[in-house]
Image (spheres, grey):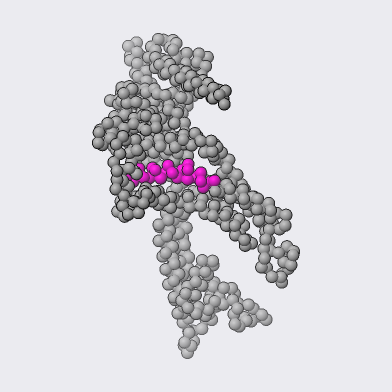
Amino acid sequence: PHRKMLAALEANQDQERDDDAEMVAEHYYITYITLAEYDRNGDRNLSRSISPEHIWDLENLRHKVGIIEISRRGILEKAYFIVPAVCWFLTPASKQRICLAVNRANLQTQLTGFSEQVDSLYEEMKHQQKLTHQLVTHFFQQTLDHREKIFFFNAILINALMLIYYSYECNGSFTCGDNEDLSYYTVRPGYKELVVVLEVLQCLMAITRQWWYVVERLLPQISQQILAHRARPPTNRLLAYIVALPPDQSDPTYRHRKRQLRTSQKGLFRLGLQKVHVVKLLYCLADRPLWGISIMTLSNLLALLLPMEGANLFLLIHLLEVFNHSQVLRDVIKSITYRGNSLLQTGVLALVMYYFFGVVGFIMFPEHFQFEKADIMGGRKLEPNNNGARCTSIWKCTLVVLDMGLRKGDIGEAMEEIQWNVHPDRPDQYRIFYRMVYTFFFHVVVTTILMNIIFGIIIDTFAELREKKEEIDAEITGRCFICGIERFRFDQMSNGGTGFEEHITNEHNMWKYLYFLVYLKEREFDDYSGGESYVFEKTQMLVRDPDTHEKVHDAETGRELKISKPQIDLLWFPQRDAMVLSKSQSATSDQHIMHKLR
């Protein structure tokens, strides 16, 4: 045991020495590249020395040292900083969500939406970092993509086996005749055990999948919702009252204060149940992805535990997982749900019209509806018509009109023929005209207008979503997120036409700006440089105890707690400006002056 303790202690000491050496190298690198910027010699020796031949760990240093441009009182300058370790836990899904969800109406709304996400992204990164500290959660974190693929393909395999080997059994044989009773179905012998094993594996993955969703995504998402509703309560008064929480349960900085106020608990909350637990439960119940995952888990448990034959068919629901693996299918579903309110109202109107035509049919043509054409024998129609659907009630007639109208699209094809008889002595002499008017208006109002409106809403929504996505893609690939300058201006001044890619990667990398704001959160306020203090004053503020007005420190790390300002000043962003363009314009101006002097 002593040898193991000594070995662990030596390993920790070696790791600390390596970390200290790496930090020293990063600070030296920042100093070196800062001096290289002011190297005015013609040969620019310092700039040439920034290469793998002179700095062996150059790629790692470039990766861990961030460089951004800030606008300080209208003058652009570079800010160098060491990227905090927590920033490497920003997930690709979060990056994609920010790129797609931010309001791109103009540069100001774009940068405002980006800045308002800093606190939530920082908490998410810290949460992801904590998950790596435990062996089990770290394993689930690293194997997420593989587990999702195994879950989906295992569902396909189970359903493929049921497709091929699930059939009716008749008198001990799986080959049933036309006159045999089809009442018992099961998996063919030899494959039932394989299906059960795969179902058990699927059930284990479904349970762990739901647990991991709650741990990794839902819990931090609920914390963000509590913070958002604390800052901006819902407009609905009842909802605002329900989600309102006392400071000790809604303010994440409360637990770090030295003196904590006691809040009174009322009613059931005196028994030790805090309101925040109830609010979190409500947020869980309102989470639609959780419902989808829970339904899949429940269907798997029913397939295993129910003793009835056919319980395995509950796993058909798992094939809906295909939507999580196909962006195209998600867009198709979104085209239906995006304008759900319009579709719902149009659908209600369609049901009203079906009811209207059902009532008219009940009064005028109760005996003339039929599911199929009447049977013919010997050239004559058999009576009674076994395929008829007599309307003996308004409810039945409405169902018949709904069924026939949706399936055939024309209610006239679902009605028996009425003889053309205009003899004045017959009481039904005008029934043929009533039928023509009835079927004509049904075809025009329901089949042509309402159905096309519903299909048009879906098609137009799909086209709108596709157009919006193309606009976002064009913005991402054709305009800098930070300065808002078009791509062609950077490509024109570069030799190989890659000036824009180099600009958004090295100069105005939007994620480096996020990392810089996180860097300000983790760096001590008294250690800020002039540029860092300027950006901090524009974007963040220190958390202070409302009683003592002292700075609040994190109880775990000891760092000063900082939060984003309610109103963020965007003047520190280099809007519509970039140093590389300024240098290019300055060089062009100098050449123009020299040409005139000659």
Look at the picture and state if 390 lies above or below 478: below
Of 320 and 575, the residue lying toward us: 320
Q: Residue at x 54, y 55 (%)?
A: 298
Q: State which quarter of the image contains the N terminus.
A: top right
- The picture quadrant where one finds residue 305 is bottom right
The location of residue 344, given as percent across then percent down, is 42, 60
From the image, give the main secondary structure of the stretch colored magenta.
helix
Q: On the rendered structure, is 113 left or right of 419?
A: left
Decide whether residue 184 is among the magenta residues. no
The location of residue 543, given as percent across then percent down, is 30, 34
Q: Residue at x 29, y 41 (%)?
A: 261
Look at the picture and state if 47 lies above or below 74: above
Q: How many marks?
A: 0
Look at the picture and state if 31 lies above or below 101: above
Q: Quick check: can you spot residue 458?
A: yes
- The picture quadrant where one finds residue 104 is top left
Residue positioned most to the front? 2
Of 16 and 271, the residue lying toward us: 271
Q: Residue at x 38, y 42 (%)?
A: 224
Of 213 and 339, the residue lying toward us: 213
The location of residue 111, given as percent across then percent down, is 35, 35
Q: On the rendered structure, is 340 left or right of 598?
A: right
Q: Residue at x 58, y 52 (%)?
A: 319
Q: State which quarter of the image contains the C terminus.
A: top left
Q: Quick check: can you spot residue 488?
A: no
Q: Which residues are magenta?
A: 208-230
Of 313 and 436, the residue lying toward us: 313
The location of residue 41, given as percent across then percent down, is 40, 10
